[in-house]
Image (cartoon, helix red, strand yellow):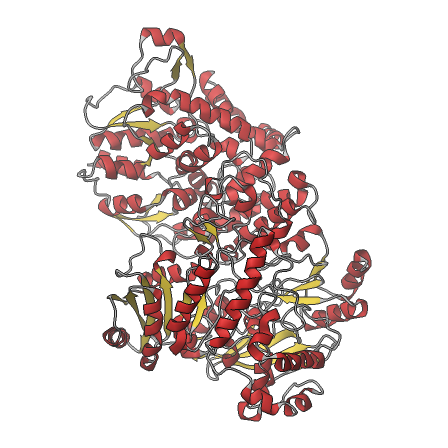
Amino acid sequence: MTDQRELAAALRAAVRGEVDLGVTARALTTMDASNYRRIPLGVVAPRDADDVAAALAVCRERGVPVVPRGGGTSIAGQATGTGIVLDFTRHMNRLLSLDPEAGTAVVQPGLVLDRLQEAAAPHGLRFGPDPSTHGRCTLGGMIGNNSCGSHSVAWGTTADNVRTLSVITARGERLRPGPGWAGAPEGLRALVEGESARLRTGFPDLPRRISGYAVDALLPENRADVARSLCGSEGTLAVLTEAELTLVRAPRARALAVLAYADESGAAQAAAGLLPYRPLTVEGMAADLVPSAADLPRGGAWLFVEAGGDTGAEARAAAEAIVRAADVVDALVVTDPARQRTLWRIREDASGTATRMPGGTSRTKSGGGSEAWPGWEDCAVPPARLGDYLRDFRALLAEHGLRGTPYGHFGDGCIHVRIDFDLLTGPGVARFRRFSEELADLVVAHGGSLSGEHGDGQARAELLPRMYGAETVALFERVKGVWDPDGLLNPGMLVRPAPLDADLRFSALPREPVDVAFGYPADAGDFSAAVRRCVGVAKCRTTSVSGSAVMCPSFRATGEEEHSTRGRARLLHEMLAGELVTDGWRSTEVRDALDLCLSCKGCRSDCPVGVDMATYKAEFLHHHYAGRRRPAAHYAMGWLPVWLSWAARTRTAGVANALTSVRPLARAAKRMGGIAGEREIPFLATEPFSRWWRRRRRSAEDDGPLVVLWPDTFTEHLSPSVGRAAVRVLEAAGMRVVLPPTLRPRSGGRVGDARSRSPLSLLTARRGRVCCGLTYISTGQLDRARAVVRRTLDLLEPVLATDAPLVVLEPSCAAALRTDAPELVHDDPRAAHLASRVLTFAEALERYAPDWTPPAVNRPVTGQTHCHQHAVLGDGPDRRLREAAGLTGELAGGCCGLAGNFGFERGHEDVSRACAEEQLLPSVREAPQDAVVQADGFSCRTQLEQLGGVRGRHLAEILAEALEEE
C-alpha cells in the first residue's frame, strides 16, 4: 500500500508545480463526465515537461499509476484513476506559437480549444474539430480521445489535424512522434511490420472509427504516422507535453439550413445524401431535446446543415441548394450570426438536456423525469446505414424497456444518446450489461465502431473483442507493452480493461433519501438525486460568457475547479458517499468550496441539467451550522430585515447613518458584523417606502386593475425611490396600486383589498410584515426562513383570495418567492399559489396595461441583467418595455459580484471585484456618454456606486423620470 505522506514528500521535492494529496483535490477528480468513479491518491499540476518527467519518475519508482487529465469532460471514464492525476489545465495551458502563413499552431495539452480558436480567428483560421464542450475541453484531451465535433464532415477528426507531438513515456523517454516512424519507441516498427496483413483487413473503414488503437496509421500507405497512431490512445501509451496542429481556413460567411423531418430515422436517412454538397456540418436531433420555445421549422427531427462561402450571398446560395436537394417537411435558412448561435446552443446543450427525460418508469425516475446516462454515447456506423441502424437501435431499446433520444453527427454516422439505465440497483446494472453486450453486437453487424468520438475508456473497452476479434485486441495489448511496459499509464482503460459495470459512481451514494429542508420537487425530494444531476459536462468551467449567460462567476474569477458548479457538486457527492469526505454535513472541505458560491442561481438556467447550487448551498449551511454558532455575517446580514425594521420603528435611521459615517465606528461595526473592511455600509432611508405610502395624497382613482406592490426589504429601507417610482409608473398605466396587509385577523376575517382596515381587525389582529425570506435562505437559516414565509402566507391570505398579482421590484426577492419559497414550504399549497401570482415590474405592465405606451426615453442603455432575473424570471418583458421606451442597446450578462450578502462578507472582496470587472463595470465604462445605467437589483446598484462611482437606476426610476419630463 502506498504511503501517501512519503509519496507527497517525494513529489514535492521533485516537482515545481503544485502537489496536492488533500481531500478536496482528490474529491474533485474522482469522476469525469462518465458513469464511473475512482478515488485518486492525489493531483499534480506540472509547470512544464520537466515536471511531468519528474512526476513520472517518482510514480514509476513506487508503482503508482498516472492519469493525464484535461478538462475532465471524458464520457467513458478515461479521465479517472486510482493513482496520481496530472492536471494540465493550471500551468501547461499556453498557446506557444501560431504561424498564419504555414497554418499551424503549437500548443500545450491544457490549452482550452476556444482559446486557440480566438487566437486563430483574426487570421481567418481555426482548428477544425470542435466538440460541443469547446469552451472547456483541452487540446490534450481532444488528442487523447481523438475528438471530432460537428464540423468533422468538412475537417475530419483531431487525428486528421495533428502534425507532430511531444511526449514522455512512462519510463521517462522523450519522443517527438510524427510521420515516417518519427518518435517511435523501440520495438514498435517490428511489431507493426509483423502484423501488416491484420492491420490492412481488421479495421472498419468509416469516418468515425475511434475505438481501439489506431495501429493501422503505422502502415506505409498511411505514412507510418506515429503521431496519428497516438491520437485516441486515452493517455495509456505516453504523456503528451506539446502538440503541433494544422489549422484550416474558415469560410468568411456561413448560412445554416435547418431541415425538418417527421422523425430521426427520416433525418438519418437523408444525411448521407447531403454530403456531396460539401457541407460544413450535418447535425441531427429530435424534438425530445428541443425547448418548446425553440424557433425551429415544424417537424419531429431536424438536421442542422451549415454551408460556407466567401460572401453572405454565396453561403446562402449554398444553403438554399441543400434545402432544394433535401426531401423535407419544412426548412429554414438562417444567415444572422446571433440567431445561428442561438440555434447551435440548443444542439450543444443536448449532452446535458438528454440526461433528463419527461415521464418514464425507470427506477431512477424523479419528479423531473427519468434520469438518463452516458455509456453508449457515441457509436458510429457508415453514414449510409444510419437510418437502418437507428431503427434496429430503437427496437433494442424497446426490447429492454429502455428509453433514449438519439442526436449527434448524422453526416458521419455518429449517434449520441443517453439512456435511462437504472444504475442504482443490482437488476438494473445487470440489464445495463446485457444491453451493452447486445448493442455492441448490433453496431458491429452494421459495420460500425463502438466509439465514434469519446473513446472506449471503461465503458466500452471490455467489448472491443466483439468489434475487432481477440487477436487484434491482443495486438493492442502488445502495442501497450511497447510504449508502457510497466502498465503505469491509465491502467484499466482501453486494454486489459476494468469491467464496464464496475466502479459506477452511483454505488457509493446512500440508498435512502437524505433528510433535508427543501422539497426538491424536480428530484422527488431526494437530495442525492439532485446532486447526481451534475454529469460533468462542465459548462460551468467556461472562462468567458456570452450574451446574458451567468454561470459560473466564481470559477471565472478564481479558475479553481472547487469554485465551479461541477466542483461543488463533486464535493457534495463525496460528502454523501462518506468514503473520502467523512464529516458529512460538518465537512470543512464542502464548506470552503461553497464559500465562494455567490448564490447567483446562474447554474439553475445555464447548466444543461439544471443544477441549482444556490439551493444546495443553503441546504448545506442549514445543516453545517445546526446547533452551533454561525459566522458573524450570518447574523449581521442574514437578519437584515429585522435590524432595518427596528431602525424604522425607532426612527433611528439618521442616527445609524451618522454613526457609520465616523470611520472608527464604521470599522468597529464592520469587524463585529463580519463585513469586509473595504466596503462602505449603505445609508438607510430616513423615510421608509411604506411610511411614504401612508402619508402620500392618493392621486389614483379606485378603478383599473388592482396590483399589490411588494415592499421588499431593500426597497422599503434602502431604496424607497424605486418604490415611489414604481407607484408613479403603474398608476400612470392605469393600475390601482396597494400594499400587502400588515395585520392578520385572529377571527379569520378579511382585511379587504390589502389597504382598508376595520375597527374590529385593528383590535383583534396580529401585526407583521411580508418578507420573502431571501437573506435567511442565502445564509442557510432555513428554519427561520420557513417561519418568515409562513407568516407571509398568513398575512397574504386576503390577497390570495383575490385575483390581484404581487408586483415585486427586487429581482432576487421575486426569484425567492417564485422558486425558493414553494420549495422550502413544500407542504403548504399556499406557497405555490403565491409563486404563481408573482410578477416583475415589466411583466405587470405587459399583462395589465398592454395598450399603455411608456414615455419616450430615447437614449442608449447600459448595465447588467440581474442574475436572478436571468436564471429564474426571464427578461423578455423587460426587453420589450425598454424597446417601447426607446432604450437602445443590450444589458450585459454575468453577475455584479455583490450578490446580496456575498460581496459584503469578509474575505470575498477580491472575488466580488473580479466578477464586477468581468462584464458590469466594463460595459458601463464603454457606454456612450448619454447612456442610462440600468440596474434593477439593489446589489447591482451598490456595486456600481462603490466600485465604479456610477449611479444605477431601476427601470421604474428611468420611466418615472421620463414621465416627469413629459
Q: Is residue 667 visible?
A: no
Q: Measured from the top left, where is residue 277 in percent x and y?
A: 31, 80
The residue lying at 35 percent from left, 65 percent from top is 264
Report the quarter where the N terminus lies: bottom right
**Nearest to the observer: residue 685 or residue 899:** 899
- Describe residue 396's horizontal placement relative to residue 783 as left or right: left
Can you give x and y, in whole percent of width and height, for residue 848 in the image?
23, 34
The image quadrant where one finds the C terminus is top left
Indicate left or right for 41 with 408 as reference: right
Front one among 30 and 804:
30
- What residue is at 51 percent from the left and 33 percent from the top? 777
Q: Is residue 405 left or right of residue 30?
A: left
State the count of labels.
Answer: 0
Whole-percent x and y of residue 928? 33, 52
> Looking at this view, is 933 or 711 the one in front?
711
The residue drawn where x is 67% and y is 68% is: 492
Visible in this render: residue 387? yes
Closer to us: 476 or 750? 476
User: Which residue ends up furthest to the left in the rendered image?
Assistant: 851
Q: In the figure, 539 relative to 757: above or below?
A: below
Image position of 446 with respect to 965: above or below = below
Look at the picture and state if 433 lies above or below 313: above
List x then y, in percent, for residue 30: 64, 56
Question: Is residue 774 positioned above or below 339 on the image?
Answer: above
Place residue 758 in its image quadrant. Answer: top left
